[in-house]
Amino acid sequence: MPIKFTLLGLLFFFTIQGARAQETLSKDLDYAYLDKLIAICRANYPKIKMYQAHVEAAESGVKKAKLSYFDIFNFSYLYNPKNNGAPVSASFPFTYQFGFFVNIGAILQKPAMVKQARSELASAEYDKQSFDLNMEAEVKKRYFTYIQKKAVYRVRSNASLDVESMLTNVKKRFEMGQETLEKYNQVLIMQTDHAQNLLNSESEVLVAKSSLEELVGQKLEDIK
C-alpha cells in the first residue's frame, strides 16, 4: 500500500511538472507576432509570388479566350474602280462589295476553349490556396520550434548556473579537506556535460531562428 501511494505521488508530481512546463512555453508564444510573420511570409516568399503569377496568367487566359469569340466573325470588302471598259455612271464612278462571314467550326470550339481556360484558372487558384495553407503551417511549425528551443536553452542555462555554483562550493570544500576527490570529479564532469548541452542548445536556437527567417525573408530583429 505505501508503495502504491508513492507511485501515485510520483505520477502526480510529474504531471504537475509537465503542466507547469507547458504553461511556461505557452506564455512565450505571441500569436499576434506569429500572424505578422505569416503575413510577411506571404508578401516576401518567392514561391508564393510564383503561384500568384500563375493565377494572373490563367486570368489573362480566360480573358483571351472570351475575346477570341470575335474571331468567329470575318468582315471584308472589295473596291471596284470600274476600269474594265464597262459603262461608268457619273453618279457612281466606283463600287464597293462587302462580305460578312461566320466560321461555324469556331463557334463550336470557342465554348470548350473558354471552359478549359476557366478550369486552368481554377487549378492555379487551388494550387495557390494549397501552397498558402502549407506555408502558413510551416511558419507556425518553425515559430513553435524556435520558441521551444529558446525555452530549452533558458532551462539549461539556469541549470548550468546551478552546477557552476555547486562546483564552486565543492571545490572550496575539497581544498579545505571537507570533500572527497571522487565527489569533486563527479561535479566537475557534471559541469562539463551541462556546458556542452548549453552549447548544443544555443546552436539549436540559432538554427531554428535561421530556419524561420528563411520563410519570412527578414531578420526577426527587424520585425516588431
Image (cartoon, rainbow, N blue to C red):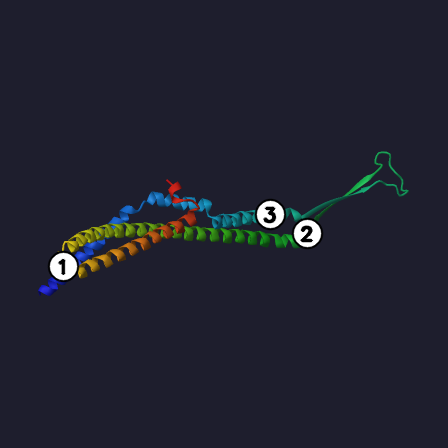
Does 145 sit left or right of 130 as displayed?
A: left
User: Label 1 is placed on what type of residue?
Assistant: Gly
User: Label 2 is placed on what type of residue?
Assistant: Asn
Q: Which residue is mark 3?
A: 64
| Chain-order first, disc 1 or disc 2 | 1
Front position in the image: 141 or 120? 141
Q: Residue at x 45, y 44 (%)?
A: 43
Q: Position of residue 94 (x, y in %)?
A: 83, 38
- The secondary element bearing badge 2 is classed as loop
Q: CA distance from mark 3 to mark 1?
A: 74 Å
Q: Residue at x 26, y 50 (%)?
A: 157
Front position in the image: 147 or 64? 147
Q: Position of residue 144 (x, y in %)?
A: 33, 51
Q: Which residue is mark 1?
A: 9
Q: Is the residue 203 above or below the residue 78 in the image?
A: below
Front position in the image: 193 or 159? 193
